[in-house]
Amino acid sequence: MHGQPQTEQVATQADAAYASLHEAILTGRLRPGAKIFISGTAATIGVSPGAVREALSRLSAEKLAVATAQKGFSVAEVSADELKDLTQTRIAIEQLCVKDAVKSGDLEWEASAVAAFHRLRRLPHLAFEDTAKRKPFLNPAWASAHGAFHTALASGCASPWLMTLRAMLFAQADRYHRLSVTLSRVARDVDAEHEALLEACLARDSSRAQRLIESHLNKTMDIILGSPSLRAGRRG
């Protein structure tokens, strides 16, 4: 037979649909609460409706999409209460991951963390969609490098389950981060926070690294809580 087997084609299409929808939700192109139309999404991405349904099932399991009886799928809402709960849960999981990484991480782990920090520090936090109005938004390259840095710090953790939970929580937190429009107006030396966290990990100072993680994530939460959508009590 020529071409891929049918099951492999479906899997490939579902992965493509998942990647496209996942990126659209995290970057805010699909806003919280927005309805996701299966047929329209399938046509836009160029995959089958079945592949979109499979992708949406995965996103629902990750709490990024919601399935409602008789109404179909929509983007998960956001709220201040959820952000607070998410942040405290994420702190606990990040601390466990870093604690294990500091204990068992090898030289390669150290090198990957240093390289990830170096790349992150060289990128601007914000980008501008309109040079005349100077309207800022979170630089996608910085956001990607930021995720890679925190993942590199945790990557020495030997528990696959902890790392899986960590990735899910990070994606949820990243969505809140990107949706916030207040970050650009807050005086904060994020590079210094990241550098201090890196140094604590390299020094194998688990207690300090865990304290810094708690402080770092709580600062981000406090800033995002000031975003207009959360202040208005919008859910999603």
Image (cartoon, grey):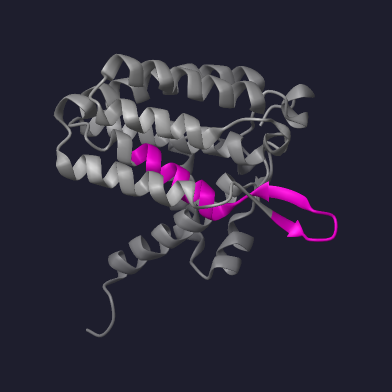
- Of residues 233 and 67, which is closer to you in this image? 233
Can residue 86 be seen at all in this image of the molecule?
no
Q: How many marks?
A: 0
- x 64%, y 32%: residue: 77
Location of the N terminus by quadrant is: bottom left
Q: Is residue 140 above or below residue 3?
A: above
Q: Position of residue 198 (x, y in %)?
A: 35, 33
x 34%, y 61%: residue: 11
Decide whether residue 147 is among the magenta residues: yes
Q: Is residue 186 above or below residue 46?
A: above
Residue 219 locus on image (x, y percent): 57, 22
Please tell me which residue lies in front, 9 or 188: 188
Q: 68 or 105, which is in the foreground?
A: 105
Please state if 193 lies on the left or on the right of 40 as rendered: left
Corner quadrant of residue 200:
top left
Give the image location of residue 3, x and y in percent: 28, 81
- Position of the C terminus, as image quadrant, is top right
Near-viewer residue (211 or 65): 211
- x then y, percent, for residue 103: 17, 24
Residue located 44% across and 31% down the image: 169
Q: Residue furthest bottom?
A: 2
Is residue 85 visible to us here? yes
Quadrant of residue 101 within the rendered picture: top left
Is residue 227 on the magenta stretch? no
Farthest right residue?
133
User: What is the span of residues highlighted in magenta in the rendered image?
Assistant: 128-151
